[in-house]
Each structure stands twice: as structure tokens, then as C-alpha cells.
Amino acid sequence: MDRLELARSIINSLVVFDRPVSLSSEVIEVFEKHPWPGNIRQMHSVLRTAVALLGYGNEIALEHLPEDFLDQSSQGEHVAIRTEHGETATLLIADGTSLESLEKIAIREAVRECGGNMAAAARRLGISRNTLYRKMQAPD
């Protein structure tokens, strides 16, 4: 199933009264370029917000998408990183990003992907849980 077909399926599950809702060409372009590091859950969350903001309209436009998603989609470069366990993660890296910032991003993503399970996130990152907590508490 391609991204747009999946998006349309999610929209149909979110819209009540079987009203037709489509994606604007700008939204389609953003969806096709976005790497979707959060996979289906992220797309579902983005579209749930968009449908709520759409109200009674029939076309989801950029103005209906969450700001954090648009920021993530429009800035920097997406880089795929392979973990020591062979898993692939996608990070958004803006110009001038420091190593410390990248570490914070990787930690946040690991914790999010593990549903807040700190032990699983630490294993995914290849560090101890104590190190994970220490790095999370470090000032920005």
C-alpha cells in the first residue's frame, strides 16, 4: 500500500457521515517527501489533527497539518541511521546541528518509538538505563 492510499484509508476511517475529504496538492507533495519515521501511527496522528482542524471542509490543506509536522518536513535533511541491532531510524538534521543535539534527537526518538519504555529505549540505543536518564536530564 503506498503512502497516499494509506492516507486516504486513514482519512476515511476518521471522517464521519461518509463525506468526501481529499488532500490538496501541497499536502500530497509533503506526504510523498516525508520519510514517516513514526510510520502509520505518525500518519494517523497527523491526519486525525488535520481532520479535526478541517471542520466541515472537504480538502485538507497545509494549514490543517500540525505545525511540528510541517517543521519536521520542511527543514534540514533526513538521514537514515542503522543501529547496532540492524534497525533503521530516520533523523532530521538541520544545518549547524551539534552532536549533542543529534544525541538528544536520537534519545527522544528512541523513547517515543519504544512507547516511553526507558529500558527498551536504552537497549535500542546501546546504553544503560542510567546513562539514558543522565543524558535526558542534561541541559540543552
Image (cartoon, rainbow, N blue to C red):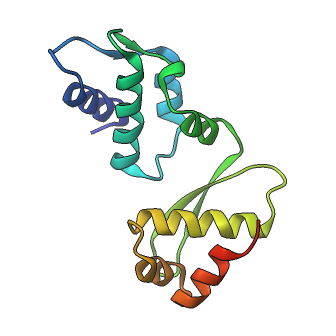
Vertical placement of residue 10 versus 82, above or below: above
Asked if residue 98 lies left or right of residue 28, the reply is right
Where is residue 52 drawn, in percent x and y?
A: 36, 25
Asked if residue 51 lies left or right of residue 123, the reply is left
Vertical placement of residue 18 versus 40, above or below: above
Q: Residue at x 43, y 52 (%)?
A: 38
Where is residue 123 drawn, in percent x and y?
A: 46, 84
- Position of the N terminus by quadrant: top left
- Position of the C terminus by quadrant: bottom right
- Outermost top residue: 57
Asked if residue 114 lies left or right of residue 73, the reply is left
Asked if residue 27 lies left or right of residue 1, the reply is right
- Outermost left residue: 17
Residues 56 and 1: in front is 56
Q: Residue at x 21, y 25 (%)?
A: 12
Residue 6: name its quadrant. Answer: top left
Residue 103: name its quadrant. Answer: bottom right
